[in-house]
Image (cartoon, helix red, strand yellow):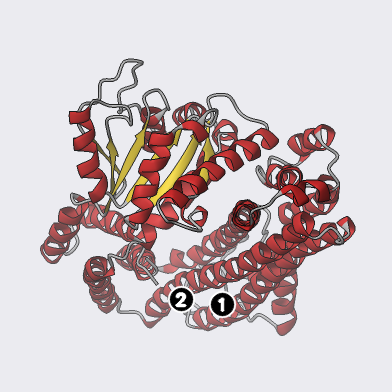
Amino acid sequence: MSIRAETLFQAYDKTADFVQANQFETTAFQAIQTMFEDKRQKADAHIMVYGVYNAGKSTLINALLGQEQAEIDDVPKTDSVTAYRWGQYDILDTPGVDAPIEHQKITDGEMLKADAVIFVVNPVGAAEEKNTLSKLLELVQARKQVFLVFNEKQTLEMEDFQRLKDQTQQRLQDLAAAKGLNNVLKDIPIVRVNAKSAFKGKTENKSNLLEKSGFPEFEKRLNEFLQSISLDHIYGRLKTALVTFLADGLQSLQMRSQANMVKKYDDLLKNIENNKNQVRRNVRQAIGNERGSIERNVANQLRKSVFDGQSAQGDTDSQIQQAFQYGAEKVSDVLQMEMSALVQQLQLDIDDLQAQIPQNQIAVESVNLSDLNYGNVQAAVDGSQLGAQSVSQISPDVVAAAVGQLSQIAKPEHIVKSLQLVKEYIPSLMKGVGIKTMEKWAGAFMSKLPYVGLVISGLFALKDIFGGDSEAAQMQQQIEEQNRQRERAMQQIADAARDVASQFENIMREQTEKTIEETFANIMQQVHALRQGFSDSERKNSEWIEQLSQYHALAENA
């Protein structure tokens, strides 16, 4: 699995801040700092933004950057390639498609060096932009990753978008055929964005506006591609150096602890952090598995709806509902299993630790996981002093009660509500209620699943475009044209299925992550109460161990 550079740099930055603030192992850290800072100056990949003047290239760049850096003007001014840093990548602003010849030569040279090229077009008239589409196909021939962005200056209705997308794909097929290319649509994703709204939403922290602009999905797909560019030979070296430094630092701190109880406490903190990351990994893997299953299921049902005239609409409705519900239930089962096992083991660890507390220790509070309130993160200790009989010995019944509480968070209310909305609204969408359905969706559903309704409703545009009637089918004389038509339909279906599955993944990740974070924050608030009996030096040392354990886990999981 590829190393996630962004996560690795987060671990490095946190470690660097810790080292600086506490003057901890500064000499040993210098070599690591040099390695990371040197890599930070070198871009992992180059992304070129290309298109005609006034298509919105600079606005899209500014939306990616989250601030206005690329110059926006009605008069062509870009006569060279300008690079802007975006994370670990360089974004290249170029002269437009219709730039003077000398400027175009500059663009062509840089384009061949780029790892990805974003073509920005106005969707109205995109199919007529022969120069842009021809240039795009040249890059496909050169095995470059390309993105075709419809920059909607005025938001299009879904059916209009589907028709313009089909017209553009048909034009691409015609131009590709002239070059001897076949089946090119799978290599040319078409993404819709309102760059102006995206920029405004980002810079003014208007999340709803940003969501409606279509920008998050574009950014997600761009990131997925960039992460696939393997630089593990470079980042592997950085990761090993940072993980080793943190492991050595933890060992050094642990050797400072004299009391056996403190050592056990520090081990408990490390175990909690490791368990948290293990839960997160397993839940994310489950979500990814169900995402793939949903994508295949939805694609299959949409193919039946478009191509199989004998397919009952009710079957399609039922299958899509079941795909969402079954997928979420599978994820919930994994979450429940992981958290139940965690609580049982954690309670045993805490009992063991509490048994180490000297009976004459004062102001040390017992920790009981059965007191956790998973809806609100808050301490559940009462502040009482402990005597000889106060050390907690948690019974199996109490552990069972704690596990029982977890069943309430395994299917959190927000996920259950989302599933219910899917069950209620997808059947009406699939029946093509039209504007009224979309109004209901926008009012009651879009806050949770912002694009699913629009994507699924695109099915009706697909049926209108590709379904045809028997008379129209009889008029098609060329098998080649029929194959191209089918290719466009299959690509639109694949896009729709991917978008629906992606929204399922986004929602499940967001809600399960929230549950995991709240639960562990609650646990840690209670476990921290045990530090009250430590000396000042032991408490500080323990706090440092906790911090470095978090950074170590973050680096390990990058």
Query: Would you say 298 lies left or right of 272 here?
Result: right
Q: Position of residue 326 (x, y in %)?
A: 76, 67
Foreground pick, 141 / 5: 141
Query: Would you say 340 lies left or right of 199 here?
Result: right
Q: Determine the image quadrant of residue 397.
A: bottom right
Q: Amino acid at mark 2?
A: Asn
Q: Is residue 123 in view?
A: yes
Q: Amino acid at mark 1?
A: Leu
User: CA gap, disc 2 to disc 1?
Assistant: 9 Å
Q: Position of residue 145 (x, y in %)?
A: 38, 53
Foreground pick, 28 / 355: 28
| Residue to which mark 2 is pinned | 271
| Residue to which mark 1 is pinned | 346
Pointers 2 and 1 in contact (C-beta within 8 Å): yes
Q: Residue at x 25, y 20 (%)?
A: 77
Foreground pick, 429 / 420: 429
